[in-house]
Image: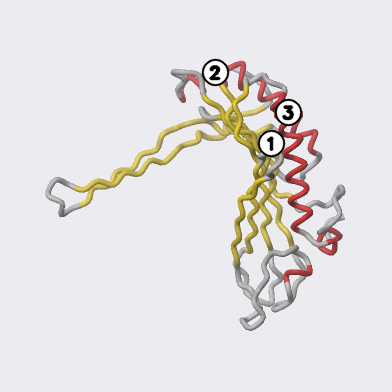
Amino acid sequence: MARQRYLKNAPITEALIDIHVEPKAGLTFEGLREALGALDFGYYVKSPIAHGLFGFRRTLDGNQAETTAAAEQIGVRMHSADELYVAQCRLSGFTLSRLPPYEEWHNILDETKRLWTIYTDCLAPQRVTRVATRYINKLQLPLQAGESYQTYLQKLVDVPDDVPQAVASFFQRFELVDVESAHRVILTAAQEPVSPPTPPSVILDVDAFVPTSLRPKDDQIWAILEQLRALKNRTFFSSLTEQAAELYE
């Protein structure tokens, strides 16, 4: 595993903080849009967020199937003026994403705190039901076709010896539990389809989260996020070899 430290050229393509809520009774999409649209806090509405609904039902004669499809608007996607932050304000929660270039944790955390105050003041959610931080990394690995991924990825992509060694694509997903804290992390590793001899591009997605039942103004939300950040970092560096980490110093 790689030693944990600050990586000047970290391969982060998106970093986000996500908070799920139990909404105020009777809150609608129109109410959400009007409440947020009346404020000026440095973001503009980019587009609505829709949730797709699909149904399948047999007719009374049993010989023909009927399908239905609909889209329900559940929130709005808002961008900062510099296009570096994307805020998703939904009936069911709030997500803030930081796009490249990534800066530091405290920047996205401070901006989340600022926007969370606006979200809770406007929409008055009843409870916080889930807290998460997720980092999506894109690793450009200088591997030749057939070379072992173990040079860069710790205990991932271990191809059996007696099969072809040139990997065109792969997908691995683990949901892991930290027994002491009950915090969870979803670790996903995937290679985008590639034709050798093109070097592989590997997505390493680390999603650390925990179910909660907290008041929206409870400072424990931020303490939990710091713990999840530590779990995220531990998972990320444990997934890499030292040789991989050195690529991004």
Residue 130: which disc? none
Q: Residues within 10 Å of mark 2 (few under 14, many from 20)?
A: some
Question: Which residue is identified by label 3?
Answer: 222
Q: Secondary structure at mark 2?
A: helix
What residue is drawn where x is 85% and y is 50%?
A: 4
Q: Secondary structure at mark 1?
A: strand
Q: Earlier in the sequence, mark 2 or mark 1?
A: 2
Q: Position of residue 224 (x, y in %)?
A: 71, 32
How far apart, in angstroms, are the residues tagged by discs 2 and 3?
25 Å
Q: Quadrant of the C terminus?
A: bottom right
What residue is drawn where x is 47% and y is 20%?
A: 27
Q: How many marks?
A: 3
Corner quadrant of residue 193: bottom right
What residue is drawn where x is 59% and y is 33%?
A: 88
Image: 200 above or below 249: below
Report the side of 70 relative to 4 (left or right). left
Q: Position of residue 7 (x, y in %)?
A: 85, 50
Observer-nearest residue: 59 or 209? 209
The amino acid marked with disc number 2 is Ala
Q: Position of residue 39 (x, y in %)?
A: 61, 18
Mark in front: 3 vs 1: 3
Question: Which residue is identified by label 1?
Answer: 85
Q: Secondary structure at mark 3?
A: helix
The amino acid marked with disc number 3 is Trp
Question: Which residue is identified by label 2?
Answer: 35
Image: 210 above or below 127: below
